[in-house]
Amino acid sequence: MRIIVAGGDGFCGWPTALYLSEKGHDVTIVDNLVRRKIDNELHSNSVTPIASLQERVDKWKELTGKEIKVYEGDLNHYDFLTLVFKNERPEAFVHFAEQRSAPYSMIDREHAVYTQQNNVLGNLNVLYAIKEFEPDCHLIKLGTMGEYGQPNIDIEEGYIEIEHKGRKDTLPFPKQPGSFYHLTKVHDTHNIMFACKIWGIRATDLNQGIVYGLNTEETKKDPVLANRLDYDAVFGTALNRFLVQAAIGHDITVYGSGGQTRAFLNIQDTVRCVEIAAENPAEQGEFRVFNQFTESFSVQELAEKTKKAAEELNVEATVKSIENPRVENEDHYYNAVNTNLIDLGLEPHLLTQDVLKEILQEAMEHKDRIIVDNVLPQVTWK
């Protein structure tokens, strides 16, 4: 299958591109490399040293004989996107190419506007490119469980049956996003759903939970193929950030009460979920939603798991509560459905102590790269 992985240089996109290539698909990466530029802007870095994108794909070809083509450019530039579609004629378009950090979108007006323009307009360009050049192309779009927010009811997969004043209908599940970033994902959802309805586009929205982990079988083949590991309070997700804090002897910092509960999955399940979606495409005109996660934990539970993993490696760790920089419910009901991908064959990699220790050991190996000032939040919602 001819598959474009947009955002293929990123934390989720890179291992996905390798995995799909290993499975025999014809993979093309499209990326503007802005994530690397943001590291410079934030004076941050990946804990793991990461090679340039060209070095990465060259090494992959050297090791496997499989070629991954690369286009460096921006989805917001429609002439560029047109060229990619005409040259590659994708059968599936995996869309990771969005600014993915909630804190980054909340820094100030400029960052909020950039996030909205980059994400929403880039996605809209992709929809038009599919319509104009490859109408049978299956859009596999990375959404987020954060679109749903913290409802006091069970979270269904995209849709909910409503009875109101004696009448019933199946409607999109209500959205309560928690940042300008999460709002872009909601806007994307609405635009994709509309495009499916009016143009007959086929699309799968993968509402992904928070991803943890580092390696896949493919990224472990050579140090040049290593995946990035973010730890700062802007791009570092909760569990990875806690493990890095433990690695350098810093307090494991929980925002507020720590009762905030979220959905999580291993990076190995991210790549498998994309494969499942590609091999089982949506029907023409269908807008599917899969809740892409395997387990749910509170922030406090993750902190305690990290502390236990550290102690098993003879690393002293302390869990500390700090003021929550976000505006959110810290104690709330959370129960989300995730049956669609399981029914299609996903076999989850669960969060075990061995998984935690593997990431922690990697962080300890590279702890000289960790900038201590970056592990505490500096962006506030208020």
Image (cartoon, grey):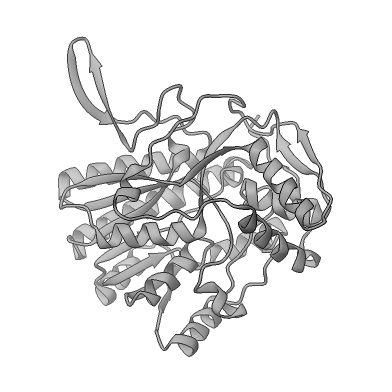
Front residue (pair 233, 74): 233
Front residue (pair 356, 380): 356
Residue 61 visible at all:
yes
Horizontally, residue 278 falls left or right of residue 284, namely right
Residue 8 visible at all:
no
Residue at image coords 35%, 33%:
156
* Quarter placement of the C terminus: top right
Residue at image coords 45%, 40%:
145
Q: Position of residue 277 (x, y in %)?
A: 30, 57
Q: Is residue 40 above or below residue 235?
A: below
Q: Position of residue 6 (x, y in %)?
A: 41, 64
Q: Is residue 113 above or below residue 329?
A: below
Q: Is residue 185 above or below residue 283?
A: above
Residue at image coords 40%, 27%:
154
Quadrant hosting residue 221: bottom right
Front residue (pair 15, 95): 15
Q: Position of residue 5 (x, y in %)?
A: 39, 66
Horizontally, residue 162 falls left or right of residue 60, namely left
* Quarter placement of the N terminus: bottom left
Residue at image coords 46%, 21%:
152
Horizontally, residue 247 falls left or right of residue 303, namely right
Q: Position of residue 233 (x, y in %)?
A: 68, 47
Horizontally, residue 314 falls left or right of residue 138, namely right
